Amino acid sequence: MNPKKLVRKILPKQGIKLAEETYRKSRVYTLQARYGFPAKGLRIIAITGTNGKTTTCCYINEVLKAAGYKTAMYTTAVIEMNGKPEPNKTHRSVALTGKLLEFLKSAKEQGVDFVVLEVTSMALHQHKLVGIPIEVAVMTNLTQDHLDYHKTMERYAEAKARLFNGYLKPKHCILNRDDDWYDYFQQQSVGQIATYGQISDSTVRIEKVIQEGQGSQWQLAYQSRAISLHTKLSALFNVYNATAAAAVGIILGLNDNAITEGIGTLELVPGRMENIDQGQNFTVWVDFAVTPDALQKVLQAGKHKGRVSIVFGATGDRDKAKRPIMGQLAAKYADSIYLTDDETYNEDPDAIRQAVYQGIVQAGGEPKTKVIADRYKAIQTAFKEAKKGDVVILAGMGHEDFRNMGGKNIPWDEREIARQLLAKA
């Protein structure tokens, strides 16, 4: 019998859990010793949440650089070391433990002042950050995702809370005051708490938001200060992402000019509402939205501009409960729906699409929906049927450069595919 299966047969569930947790922690400490505890002495800012992690990291990175600091950053889409960015081709939001320690070691060797890390609930649950000192911990928001792994929202929140509570003991905790789970994380946080949001008692308060054709402008009220900010990234959710970054700057004592310059500098986050312009008379966004909340927000952002079409599917081997919800949201906010395959992994693609389609039907979206399994053809059809002034959203793939179809990785860069199709039109 397989040793793992034998252990699971002999030990009770709680015993198995304790053994797994002990092994994971000891393995991390062993690797840290091998790499000479590279996180020691580094100033680390860690960002978690369901959506907005990558973008918030990028904003923070730009604010720190505007203040004259050397930085290193590891996110789902971009890895940057001392001013040299490169695409993250691993499809991992958090590097494997050994690779993460190599990254931190390189940061120390290059004299980096701050390290900005995107942190997932699974990385926290698996103890990947044990022994890594966190100076500032940031929460973006908590909405449904990863229930295939965590099973319940309560367990999902519990895993996220490890970044803020006595488990990692951050010096500062920056929380989204407007998020539904704020009270929970406020109670969990052990560091000095600062909040951001539109609610009046937010430490850093968002005021006077004006959403423009390209970007947004708003004011931040902090104690007796008022900071005017502008971002080139569209949508209200990016105002929140940028404000979280501004709150980090404020807590670290950076001057207003550095915060303003850093927020205004960021022009693009790969695969996040990335505009594809080949001279067509309609807008095309490639976006990584893979959760109900992210999908709703990008659809709402599109509705601000005009009629919205969406090409999307759902990922295989992931949280199945969110599939019909995403279908319902597409039916509610989109004017035309092109239901297609995302990444199937080892699941039946027909079953994945059917689960999403059930949500579309429940919300009355069947008449405006076309089911086209071939993603290339679905995008091609959406472009052919788009009218002047429309917004066509390609959701789910974002910055990624391959798709896992049936367990095999197939080259796929949705941004380049969109450019090629638009150029042929």
Image (cartoon, rainbow, N blue to C red):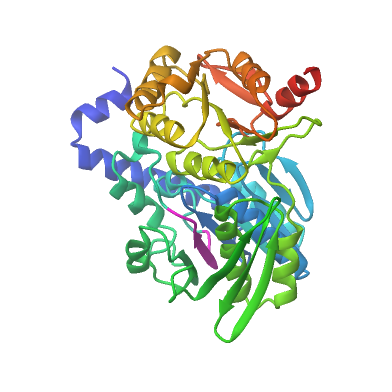
**Along the line of sight, the residue nearer the viewer: 420 or 248:** 420
Image check: 84 left or right of 387?
A: right
Q: Which of 218 and 73 is in front in this view?
A: 218
Q: Which of 144 and 35 is in front in this view?
A: 144
Q: Which residue is drawn at 20% across and 27% down?
A: 9
- From the image, which quarter does the N terminus lie in? top left
Give x and y (percent) for residue 2. 32, 20
Residue 316 covered by magenta stretch: no
| 6 relative to 40, above or below | above
Q: In this view, does 54 lie to the left or right of 80?
A: left
Q: With respect to residue 366, does 169 lie above or below?
A: below
Q: Quadrant of residue 307?
A: top right
- In this rendering, does residue 134 appear at all? no
Q: What is the span of residues highlighted in magenta in the rendered image?
A: 132-141
Instruction: Inspect this view and state whether residue 141 appears.
Output: yes
Image quarter (top left, top right, bottom left or bottom right) of the C terminus: top right
The answer to whether residue 104 is left or right of residue 16 is right
Q: Is 135 inside the magenta-drawn segment?
A: yes
Residue 368 position in % (x across, y down): 47, 22
